[in-house]
Structure formats: structure tokens, C-alpha cells
């Protein structure tokens, strides 16, 4: 597999015909896929397939799923599970490269909208895992957006039914429609019917958002579906990261109800100050309360948005007035766009390598330590370990070095400027500890901080701190000092300010 795993899914529309099955096997072998996920097989086995096969048979005229492994596959199948109607085949795989553990779930969803909704809400979750990386693939038989996932002259909303249940079930297990996450507004259809007059994106992969992978589709001559392939980089997929730091979503500050709750919370917290020995303990309790209120508000807002979208879809199915239908479609489009924006934000976090977990923070510290000079031996033989001593040794060395031959005084001055400034204890980007603690300096640090970023592990962006200070009308030094002002120390989150 050479450090990567290729998985291909295709609805084959039945392979009981000998010629079609032979052509299919030949085509799949040429694709060099490690795993092949088939739907609508209509057969109890796959004759002449050279590798492992796990077939979930239903009838010779409908249903059936199969998961095939290439003979060159490097890994072990540790467990298999089958849905009784032939619609799900789940396989647990231990991959040698990168020590990656996966659960591959092959799905062929019902065509009937009511059965599909029940299938996604009740049946599918039983086959997903909380302990392994889930990769769900197959024919979902539904779309999430008529604007981006279909091309049809029909106004029927039946193909949308079940999409919300699928989204909820997959998100509960930490996986998402990876193609839509990477390309929020792309139109890449996988099924074509009625001589090309209708097209939909029915065949999908659901993976963890941070899984390093690429998705593509190709024409397949033996079906009205296209093949969809997922290529996973296993050498990085097996890396483990710690528990993520919580971060407040700054967009909630636009909600009047949330702002009102925070005002009430801060008002109540002011009366609790005497109950704590230090301001640091008091502030830690306030942060805990803020997180509880914020999490609850976001959960309720998400539930409200989901209910609103369901009501709009129901109304669209019954509404006959053209003007009202157009209004409802605009509302639905707005809700879908907001969801795509959230997916895009998560993808941007992954694409641009935003450091959001203790794992990455620890890696940064390790690399910084490796590049740091912790001690240096001066010409006199003395070993300097302090920052001031190390910088002075560097400064003296290069000063004497340039004086041994003709030199450019201006160039020397520029080169030595950094050590000269550090020795004079001027505040630099990485030396906030020398900042004099005054209310004006602290307030300036808050209101000049870069927006859209997190202030260290506290998870509270600068926008929230500004809002809190304005609402609470409390002095900066009381708000940010970890202990009493005479201790002269700033909370670490403000020393790590990304501004």
C-alpha cells in the first residue's frame, strides 16, 4: 500500500450476469484499489475475486452489499458485522502502516423515504464505533442540498428525506461528508438517470474531518453510478492527538439571548468574589461558568436550527403557492449555507494546520526547546545560562569578530541590534513578562489583541473579553490578574497572546 490506503465505492446495479461480473472484476483490479465497496450486488458471493470478500446477501433481484480486499492488501480483518436486510457490511481492519485501526462501514440505504429516515436514525448507529476511526461509504440514496447535490427538473423533496438523520448519526460519531467539507459548493454528481436529465450526488464517503485524504470520482461503464474513491495517507492518519482545547465561538456574541445570559452571569459573579481566597480562583470559577452557559446556548441554538430546517422541508412538501415556495426555499438555502460555512471553517482549521490540541502545543514547545540556546561558554571560560549573559556573549563575540578586519559599521549595527535591544529589556514579541503591570497597559493589551484568535488555553477570544469588560465595567487589572495585584503576575493566557 506504500503508506496509503485506497478505497473505492460503486453501486453496481446487480452482478449476477457472468459477463458483467467478469468485466467488473477486471476493471476493479486495474484501479489498484485496496478495498472495494459494492452495493446492489444481488449475489451470495463474488466468483473469481482473488482476494478476501465479505458479502451480505439479500435477494437475487434487490439489495446486497459486499466489501472486497485486494490480494496486495497489508492488514488484518479482525471483525465483521452484517445488517439482516443486506444493507450494511461493517468490517474492522488493522492496517500495518501507521498502526491505523479502522472500521469500514458499507451502506446501501433504502429508496423509500420513510424507511430511509428510520434506517439512518435507528439502524446505522449500531454499526459505527466510538473506539475506532470510522469510514462510512456507499449509496446513501439521499441528498443534502438541491442546489449543490442534484440536477433535476422535478420539484419533489423526497430525495432530501433522511439526510438530516444521516447527518446527526454520523456527526455523533465524529465523521462528516468529507467531499462536501472540502468543497462546500461543488457540483460533482455520482448518479445519472433519464438520459442525463437527472443527476444526484448519492455516493459519498464520511470520515473524520482531520483524516488526511483525497476524494475523486470517475466514469464507470457498467453502472449508472460513478465510482468514488478515497485515498488515505496512513503514515499521518495514525498520529494521536490529545483532548482538544475548548474555544468559544465568537459568533454567539451576535445572539441577544446569549449576551443577556452573560450579563446576568457576570453580575452574579461579582457578588461571589469574597468567597475566593485569590482573584485567580475567582476567575477560574467564572471561566467554568462561562463555558457551561456557552455550551448550553450553542446546543439549544443548533437544535432550534435543525427543527426550523425540518419544518421548512415539511412545509415545502405541502405548499402549493409559488410565492411561498420561493420564500421557503430562500430560508432553506440560508440555513444550508450556514452549515456549509461551519464545515468550511473546520476544513480550513485542518488545511492550515491550526494548533488546537495539547498534542500540537507540546510539539511547538519541543521544537522551540530544540532551537533554543540554553547555555554558552564565554571566552573567559565562564558558562552563561541566563538570557542576559547569553546575549551579551553573542554581542561581544560578533563585536570583536568584525573589528579584526575592515567592516561595514552600518551592517554591524543592524546585526547586533537584536541582542542590544534584548539586553536593554525592551518589550519584544516573546518577552511579555517584562511588561509593567499597569491598568493602561493591560487594557491596551486586551483591546489591541488580534480578533478571531484564542487567548491561550482559556478558549475566550479577545472579542469576548472586550464584551465582558464593557458589560461588567470592571478594571482590567482585577479581571486578568491571577492573584492579588501586589503579586505582579499576569495570567499565562495573556502572556501567550497571539496578537
Image: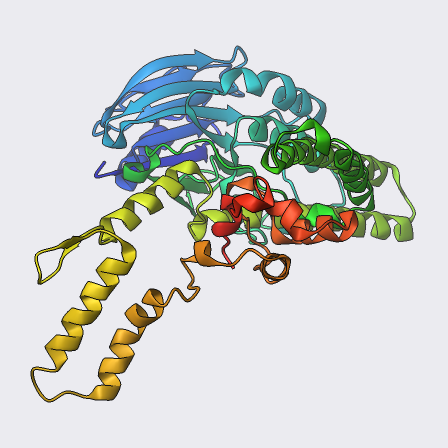
Total of numbered circles in the picture?
A: 0
Depth order, front residue of 123/398: 398
Q: Quadrant of residue 420?
A: bottom left
Whether residue 489 is situated above or below residue 437 in the rendered picture: above
Q: Is residue 193 left or right of residue 366?
A: right
- Please report the residue visible at 68 percent of the width from the left and 24 percent of the height from the top: 117
**Which residue ends up furthest to the front in the rendered image?**
486
* Residue 384 drawn at (x, y percent): 19, 54
* Residue 152 drawn at (x, y percent): 67, 49
Q: Is residue 377 left or right of residue 226?
A: left
Q: Tell me the quarter of the image containing the N terminus.
A: top left
- Please report the residue visible at 65 percent of the width from the left and 46 percent of the height from the top: 479
Whether residue 427 is situated above or below residue 256 in the rendered picture: below
Q: Is residue 406 left or right of residue 246?
A: left
- Please report the residue visible at 22 percent of the width from the left and 87 percent of the height from the top: 409
* Residue 107 visible to an observer of this rendering: yes
Q: Quadrant of residue 266?
A: top right
Whether residue 115 is situated above or below residue 211 in the rendered picture: above
* Residue 146 visible to an observer of this rendering: no
Depth order, front residue of 273/98: 273
**Which residue ends up furthest to the top in the rendered image?**
84
Colour setting? rainbow
* Residue 368 drawn at (x, y percent): 30, 50
- Please report the residue visible at 32 percent of the width from the left and 32 percent of the height from the top: 238
Depth order, front residue of 22/315: 315
* Residue 343 drawn at (x, y percent): 57, 45
Amino acid at each position: 500500500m506504500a503508506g496509503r490506503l485506497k478505497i473505492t465505492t460503486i453501486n453496481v446495479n446487480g452482478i449476477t450476469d457472468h459477463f458483467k461480473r467478469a468485466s467488473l472484476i477486471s476493471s476493479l483490479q486495474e484501479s489498484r484499489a485496496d478495498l472495494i465497496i459494492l452495493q446492489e450486488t444481488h449475489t451470495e458471493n463474488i466468483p473469481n475475486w482473488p482476494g478476501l470478500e465479505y458479502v451480505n446477501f439479500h435477494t437475487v433481484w434487490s439489495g446486497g452489499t459486499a466489501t472486497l480486499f485486494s490480494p496486495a492488501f497489508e492488514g488484518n480483518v479482525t471483525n465483521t458485522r452484517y445488517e439482516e436486510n443486506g444493507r450494511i457490511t461493517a468490517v474492522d481492519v488493522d492496517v500495518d502502516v501507521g498502526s491505523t485501526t479502522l472500521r469500514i462501514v458499507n451502506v446501501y440505504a433504502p429508496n423509500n423515504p420513510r424507511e430511509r429516515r428510520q434506517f439512518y436514525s435507528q439502524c446505522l448507529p449500531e454499526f459505527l464505533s466510538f473506539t475506532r476511526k470510522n469510514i462510512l461509504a456507499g449509496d446513501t440514496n439521499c441528498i443534502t442540498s438541491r442546489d449543490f447535490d442534484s440536477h433535476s427538473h422535478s420539484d419533489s423533496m423526497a430525495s432530501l428525506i433522511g439526510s438530516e438523520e444521516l447527518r446527526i448519526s454520523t456527526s455523533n460519531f465524529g465523521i462528516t461528508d468529507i467531499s462536501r467539507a472540502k468543497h462546500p459548493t461543488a457540483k460533482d454528481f455520482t448518479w445519472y438517470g433519464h438520459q442525463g436529465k437527472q443527476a444526484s450526488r448519492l455516493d459519498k464517503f464520511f470520515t473524520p474531518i482531520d483524516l488526511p485524504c483525497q476524494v475523486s470520482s470517475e466514469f464507470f461503464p457498467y453502472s449508472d453510478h460513478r465510482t468514488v474513491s478515497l485515498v488515505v495517507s496512513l503514515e499521518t492518519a495514525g498520529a494521536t492527538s490529545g483532548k482538544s482545547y475548548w474555544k468559544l465561538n465568537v459568533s454567539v456574541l451576535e445572539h441577544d439571548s446569549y449576551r443577556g445570559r452573560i450579563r446576568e452571569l457576570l453580575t452574579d459573579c461579582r457578588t461571589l468574589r469574597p468567597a475566593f481566597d485569590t482573584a485567580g480562583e475567582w476567575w477560574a470559577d467564572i471561566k467554568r461558568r462561562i463555558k457551561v452557559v456557552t455550551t448550553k446556548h450553542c446546543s439549544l441554538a443548533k437544535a432550534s436550527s435543525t427543527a426550523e430546517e425540518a419544518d421548512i422541508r415539511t412545509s415545502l412538501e405541502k405548499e402549493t403557492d409559488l410565492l411561498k415556495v420561493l420564500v421557503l426555499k430562500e430560508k432553506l438555502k440560508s440555513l444550508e449555507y450556514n452549515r456549509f460555512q461551519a464545515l468550511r471553517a473546520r476544513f480550513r482549521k485542518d488545511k492550515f494546520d491550526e494548533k488546537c490540541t495539547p498534542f500540537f502545543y507540546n510539539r511547538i514547545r519541543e521544537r522551540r526547546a530544540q532551537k533554543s540556546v540554553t547555555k554558552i561558554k564565554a571566552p573567559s571560560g565562564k558558562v552563561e545560562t541566563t538570557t542576559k549573559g547569553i546575549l551579551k556573549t553573542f554581542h561581544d563575540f560578533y563585536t570583536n569578530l568584525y573589528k579584526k578586519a575592515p567592516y561595514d559599521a552600518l551592517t554591524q549595527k543592524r546585526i547586533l541590534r537584536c541582542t542590544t535591544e534584548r539586553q536593554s529589556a525592551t518589550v519584544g514579541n516573546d518577552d511579555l513578562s517584562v511588561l509593567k503591570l499597569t491598568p493602561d497597559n493591560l487594557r491596551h493589551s486586551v483591546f489591541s489583541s488580534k480578533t478571531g484568535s484564542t487567548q491561550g488555553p482559556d478558549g475566550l477570544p479577545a472579542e469576548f473579553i472586550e464584551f465582558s469588560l464593557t458589560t461588567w465595567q470592571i478594571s482590567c487589572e482585577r479581571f486578568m490578574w491571577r492573584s492579588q495585584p501586589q503579586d505582579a503576575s499576569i495570567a499565562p493566557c495573556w502572556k501567550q497572546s497571539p496578537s
